[in-house]
Image: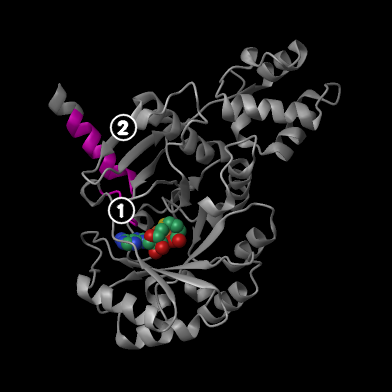
Amino acid sequence: METKFNLLDYDQDGLKEVIKSVIGDSLDLTPYRLRQIFQWVYRRRVKDFSSMTDISKKLREALAESFEITLPEIIFSQNSVDGSRKYLLKLKDGSEVESVLICQPTRFTLCVSSQVGCAIGCKFCRTAQMGLKRNLKVSEIIGQVMAVQEDVWSRGERGITFDDPEAQAPFQNIVFMGMGEPLHNKDSVISTVKILNDEHGLNFSGRKITVSTSGLIPAIKEFGESSARANLAISLNATTDEVRTEIMPINKRWPLEDLLETLRQFPLKAGRRITFEYVLLAGVNDTDEDMKRLPVLLRGIPAKINLIPYNSNSGLGYYPPEAERVQIWQKTLLSKGMNSTIRWSKGMDISAACGQLATESMRAKKKLEQALAA
Ligand code: SAH
Ligand code: SF4
């Protein structure tokens, strides 16, 4: 059987191109018509073209012939005691990825994956151990967002109903901090962010989206120059090249000084900051000297430092510092006028915390539950 194009793989510009190339120029594909299609797909959530009643029958039929609208399938989910929930999603080729709905005091945030596995090889990260299996397509990233939204609506949680998607969003923020290095899959990530931003798409403001990267300099530049609107977060994790290269091999290719210079040039809107993630690893990157060097390194960059006490992954040989030490870090940074927060982990009991995502653990849990139920 001939495979169809998944409509969710395209932002508006891309959709226009692909429809033109597949169906031809004969159809009445005005910007207005494209917006209508987007509204049917992303706002009204229809999955078949015949329901798009304000679009001509001819176009509907032509679309149905070459396109489909399919989401990744949620095959398992696990709730954490802290209100977070981890999802295991199955893709068309049988690959699996994880998304985490993170419960915070005033909001929910969805953490999405951008690749199956990751090629970057950070020593402390569980995903790194999977290696890179493949990049996710746009439909597989935007599809995580839609599938989780639709799951929350169908559960009827917090009074949200499926009929009224505008009533209340199941989550307000989206972070590209799941499995994978988003900027290693930059074209798909940029298109996904454009669909998120699109008022006829999922309509998330750029302030509500964060793309986190281990520091791929050329892709950071391209991302900054693109029309995708999202916050940038950099996994810094060290204050010297020596330590950074040891724990993040990518630092060899794109060392600290070059990375920070790129960020000084990064086009930021007034009042906005770049987030620096700093995973605290006891005895590795949490010394008094690191504490002193960090504010100096970040001079000239509007920065927000997110301190992340390490979430232990057994066998990797890294440990978090004592909670007290984490607090000293924050106090010291604040006293130097730096904006600094602590990201206490979420979903620890279900291995949903940062750097703990690797689908085999969730698959094992699913099998166990199935065996117990049998
Ligand atoms: N690949 C991207 C985004 C996913 S990782 C990146 O590295 O930025 C999201 C964050 O989790 C990164 O800042 C990473 O440094 C951090 N992280 C990885 N493993 C962790 C762990 N075990 N405990 C705490 N944070 C971790
Ligand atoms: Fe990849 Fe990010 Fe993990 Fe590094 S921390 S291996 S870049 S997912």
Left or right: residue 369 versus residue 125 is left
Q: Is residue 353 magenta?
A: yes
Instruction: Name the residue beneath numbered marker 1.
Output: 353
* Mark 1 surroundings within 10 Å by alpha-carbon count, few (fewer than 14), some (14 through 19), many (20 or more): many
Q: Is residue 119 visible?
A: no
Q: Is residue 163 magenta?
A: no
The mark that comes first in sequence, 1 or 2, is: 2
State the mark number for residue 76.
Answer: 2
Q: Is mark 2 within 8 Å of ligand 2?
A: no
- Disc 1 is placed on an element classified as loop
Residue for point 62% across, 53% down: 229
Amino acid type at circle 1 is Ala
Chain part drawn in magenta: 351-369
State the mark number for residue 230.
Answer: none
Say which quarter of the image contains residue 29.
Answer: top right
Q: Is residue 57 visible?
A: yes
Residue for point 61% across, 76% down: 264
- Disc 2 is placed on an element classified as strand
Relative image position of residue 163 (x, y in whole percent): 49, 21
Residue for point 24% across, 33% down: 366
Relative image position of residue 215 (x, y in whole percent): 52, 67
Coloration of the structure image: one colour
Q: How far apart are the two marked residues, 1 and 2, measured between alpha carbons? A: 17 Å
Residue for point 37% across, 52% down: 130
